[in-house]
Amino acid sequence: MEKNTLPVVITDGYTRISVIDELPLIHGELTFMWRPVSSEKRAIYAELLKQKQGIRKDNKLMSEMIDKQIVSWSAGEKNVETIRGLQPIIWRRLADIILFGTEAPDREDPTWEASDKLVDDDSSLEDLLAKNSETESIS
């Protein structure tokens, strides 16, 4: 058995390239470069989710959160609407892997070449927080 070489501490700018394997007759393979969520961001996300009521609002907010953490992926254009349109099982797995840390990806792929460059998205998180504290409803 190979030794796990993943870091214990999440440092600023750290990214992983992970794969959700194909599930025959349900969905294809998804490779994605993502930034793990720090415990501070996870607490902020949890607080935002507590403030929202309703499945549609939760779905949109969680899709926005997933969008903030994914740098690039193999599913074409990456935006909130595309994330909301994912096969439900992939969407749930991304939430569990990225936002909640309750599931691991099927494997890592350090050889995958991302098409987008990594950008610092701390201001994006601040924008998401501000937007959701000022707005009562997410459509």
Image: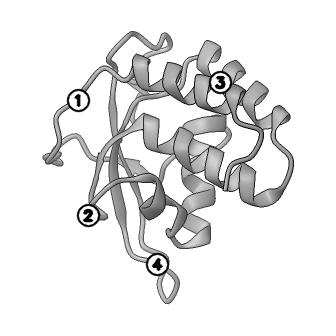
Alpha carbon separation for disc pair 1 and 2: 16 Å
Instruction: Assess disc 1: are there few (<14), some (14-19) or many (≥20) residues with their C-alpha within 10 Å of its C-alpha.
Output: some
Is label 3 in a helix, a strand or a loop? Answer: helix
Is label 4 in a helix, a strand or a loop? Answer: loop
Residue 118's mark?
1
Alpha carbon separation for disc pair 1 and 4: 27 Å
Q: Are discs 2 and 3 less than 8 Å apart at CB?
A: no
Is label 1 in a helix, a strand or a loop? Answer: loop
Residue drawn 37% across the image and 62% down it: 30
Of marks 4 and 2, the one in the foreground: 2
Q: Are discs 4 and 2 less than 8 Å apart at CB?
A: no
x, y (%) of residue 105? 49, 48
Left or right: 61, with 69 as reference point: right
Instruction: Assess disc 2: are there few (<14), some (14-19) or many (≥20) residues with their C-alpha within 10 Å of its C-alpha.
Output: few
x, y (%) of residue 31? 32, 55
Residue drawn 34% across the image and 34% down it: 16
Q: How is the image coloured?
A: one colour
Q: Is residue 67 above or below residue 31?
A: above
User: Which tag, 3 or 4, sits closer to the chain's start?
Assistant: 4
Left or right: 4, with 96 as reference point: left
Instruction: Assess disc 4: are there few (<14), some (14-19) or many (≥20) residues with their C-alpha within 10 Å of its C-alpha.
Output: some
Residue 27's mark?
4
- The quarter of the image holding the N terminus is top left
Identify residue for label 2.
Answer: 76
x, y (%) of residue 50? 84, 34
x, y (%) of residue 20? 44, 59
